[in-house]
């Protein structure tokens, strides 16, 4: 069966040279495709998790009594919301990367402790996290004051009120907007190509640079791959949203 499929794609490349799906019959190019897709998935998952954690912590600090903490959070939000993510990525990698410590496994080569993949994760997580802070903040403000006062009347302090009362409700309210931001984050991972992170776009461009006849096929597979990846995220988030929906909330 596998030989039949690879043979068909090989025949297709011979009959229609502009549609050379070389990665479907060449084991080396297939490995490049798989490794790029796997890197994109790992990058997306790690950045999704970290950006949500950043959003939760940032939204909590926005309500802090200390004006310095509130100012730091606001400055962080303005910086990451008002600059392009590609510029942020280049700034983290080329500017801050110059100040990171290095180690030498062989006594000659100096390797930075944070790789290009690490900087991509940091930059993209902080970028999406800035939007998540505002998303969770709006969710917190949607919770009635009476709910917070009831929690305080039971003896909860501010942290306990946030963790056990406010945030569980705010998270449910924030899910639709959070869904959109996380989908955007998955698409933004393609910008990691700018610092040579071997994700899917990087590998597909490398393949058609090596084999010019594979350009159309590479872009088609890339397009379909992201439709599938984003579709999985959307379906998962929509299902999670329905499962956590507050009964009666928002209904007329």
Image (cartoon, rainbow, N blue to C red):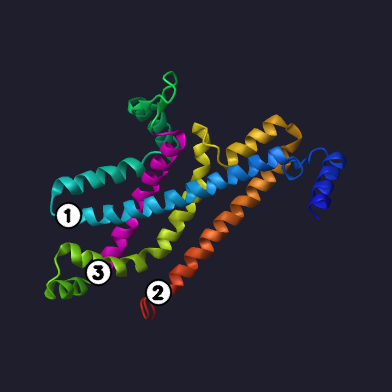
Q: Residue at x 53, y 65 (%)?
A: 235
- Which of marks 1 and 3 precedes in the sequence? 1
Disc 2 crowd, CA 10 A, few/some/many (<14, 14-19, 20+)? some
Compare residues 23 and 15 and report the one nearer the observer: 23
Q: Residue at x 50, y 48 (%)?
A: 42
In the image, residue 83 lies in the stretch drawn in magenta? no
Q: Residue 21 sits in which quadrant?
A: top right
- State the image coordinates of residue 236 (x, y, percent, origin top left): 50, 64
State which region is magenta. Answer: 114-142
Q: Is residue 110 left or right of residue 210?
A: left
Q: Which residue is mark 1?
A: 64
Q: State the CA–CA distance, disc 2 to disc 1.
A: 28 Å
Residue lying at the far top of the rendered structure = 108
Q: Which residue is mark 2?
A: 245
Compare residues 144 and 102 and report the one nearer the observer: 102
Element on which disc 1 rests: loop
Query: Is the residue under label 1 in contact with that under label 3 (CB below 8 Å)?
Result: no
Q: Residue at x 60, y 43 (%)?
A: 35
Q: Is residue 217 left or right of residue 50?
A: right
Above or below, 185 against 235 in this view is above
Residue lying at the far front of the rendered structure = 106
Q: Residue at x 42, y 36 (%)?
A: 89
Q: State the CA–CA distance, disc 3 to disc 2.
A: 17 Å
Above or below, 168 against 181 in this view is below
Disc 3 crowd, CA 10 A, few/some/many (<14, 14-19, 20+)? few
- State the image coordinates of residue 209 (x, y, percent, origin top left): 68, 31
Q: Is residue 42 left or right of residue 223?
A: left
Per the rendering, the mark at residue 164 is 3
- State the image coordinates of residue 77 (x, y, percent, origin top left): 30, 46
Per the rendering, the mark at residue 232 is none
């Amino acid at each position: 069966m596998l030989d039949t499929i690879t043979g068909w794609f090989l025949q297709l490349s011979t009959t229609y040279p502009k549609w050379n799906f070389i990665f479907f019959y060449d084991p080396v190019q297939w490995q490049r495709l798989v490794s790029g897709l796997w890197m994109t998935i790992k990058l997306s998952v790690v950045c999704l998790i970290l950006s949500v954690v950043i959003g939760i912590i940032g939204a909590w600090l926005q309500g802090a009594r200390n004006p310095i903490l509130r100012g730091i959070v606001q400055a962080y939000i303005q910086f990451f919301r008002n600059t392009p993510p590609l510029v942020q990525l280049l700034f983290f990698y080329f500017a801050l990367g110059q100040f990171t410590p290095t180690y030498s496994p062989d006594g000659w080569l100096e390797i930075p402790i944070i790789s290009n993949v690490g900087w991509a994760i940091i930059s993209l997580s902080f970028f999406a996290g800035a939007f998540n802070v505002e998303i969770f903040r709006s969710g917190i403000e949607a919770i009635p004051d009476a709910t917070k006062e009831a929690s305080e009347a039971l003896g909860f302090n501010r942290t306990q009120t946030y963790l056990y009362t406010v945030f569980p409700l705010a998270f449910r309210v924030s899910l639709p907007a959070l869904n959109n931001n996380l989908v955007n984050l998955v698409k933004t991972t393609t910008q990691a190509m700018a610092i040579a992170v071997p994700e899917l776009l990087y590998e597909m461009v490398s393949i058609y640079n090596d084999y010019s006849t594979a350009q159309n096929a590479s872009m088609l597979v890339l397009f379909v791959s992201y439709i599938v990846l984003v579709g999985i995220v959307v379906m998962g988030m929509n299902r999670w949203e329905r499962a956590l929906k507050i009964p009666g909330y928002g209904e007329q």
